[in-house]
Amino acid sequence: MISMPLLKATIKSNYKVLIIFMVVLAFYFSMIVGMFDPDTLDSMNALIESLPKDLISALNFTIVDTSLLGFIAGYFYGFLILLFPLIYSIIVANRTIAKHVDKGSMAYLLSTPNTRVKIAVTQGLFLIGSITLLIAFVTLIGIISSEAMFPGALDISGFLLLNLGTLLLYYAISGIGFIASCFFNDTNQSLAVGGGIPVAFLIIQMLSNVGDQLSNLKYATLLTLFNPTDIINKVSGFGTSFVALFILSVILYSGGIYIFSKKDLPL
């Protein structure tokens, strides 16, 4: 139950943003893979440790183990994967519903044979689909660049599992932006909540990494459900985090659709 004309229009207005983030992530991923050298990991660790300790801890730049997957998990999935897709989801989630209401184009959409539910479902599916495409692209780039530079060195099954966790995390994070976009009629308010909460999660996560005194802060952020070290080592409980992220995503997206179908619109 989606509107194909609306879906095509949404893709047209957002595909450039998606491509920009794909290029940025591909650049950083390829650069990090190129830095991997098992023979120089000790010297690289020494270089990292020469930087301010609190900064390194906040950014979670640590080598999980001496494998290529451990290196990637530490230097790409420790912080960078928490930053760029987060920005993308904030931007696009705000554009799904709130922007149309704020700019007045929602009145036109509702004058067509599209119901509110159909519009919200279409926009929600676009957001989910574009995030899936972004993470799938990162996965593909990761495998291609790793195999090109270090044939056979990447634990592909572990890498796929790591990216599944990333995908579920961003389903939940984008769900926060989507429900805010459905709730607020003003884009500034939508961004303040839909973007403010994920950014607050990131800041809290960084603070929780700096010293034992602030470590309990990790329980105040959704990002604690995504632990690259636990995932690649298959530590007991990582599957529960996956299930929790999936359930939360369903609740947030379903809640956004319901809220938009029932609320008063300034049309």
Image (spheres, rainbow, N blue to C red):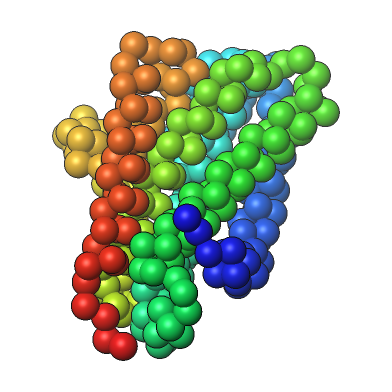
Instruction: Report which quarter residue 8 is drawn in.
Output: bottom right
Percent position of residue 25, x then y: 63, 48
**Where is residue 44, by image quadrant?**
top right
The reply to whether residue 109 is in sight is no
Give how far across and how far down residue 231 sits, in percent.
44, 21
Q: Residue at position x 30%, y 35% from top? A: 247
Horizontally, residue 16 falls left or right of residue 240, namely right
Q: Nearer the viewer, residue 57 or 124?
A: 124
Whole-percent x, y for residue 77 in the image = 51, 35
Above/below status of 1 relative to 266: above
In terms of depth relative to the viewer, which is nearer, 247 or 230?
A: 247
Q: Quadrant of residue 138?
A: top right
In the rendered view, tell whether residue 111 sits above or below residue 172: below
Q: Viewer-proximal residue, 20 or 92?
A: 92
- Location of the C terminus by quadrant is bottom left
- Residue at (36%, 68%) from the top-left corner? 116
Regarding residue 44, the answer to whether it shows in the image is yes
- Establish if 29 lies above or below 130: above
Give the image location of residue 213, x and y in percent. 17, 34
Q: Who is closer to the viewer here, 161 or 6?
A: 6
Q: Residue at x 29, y 78 (%)?
A: 185
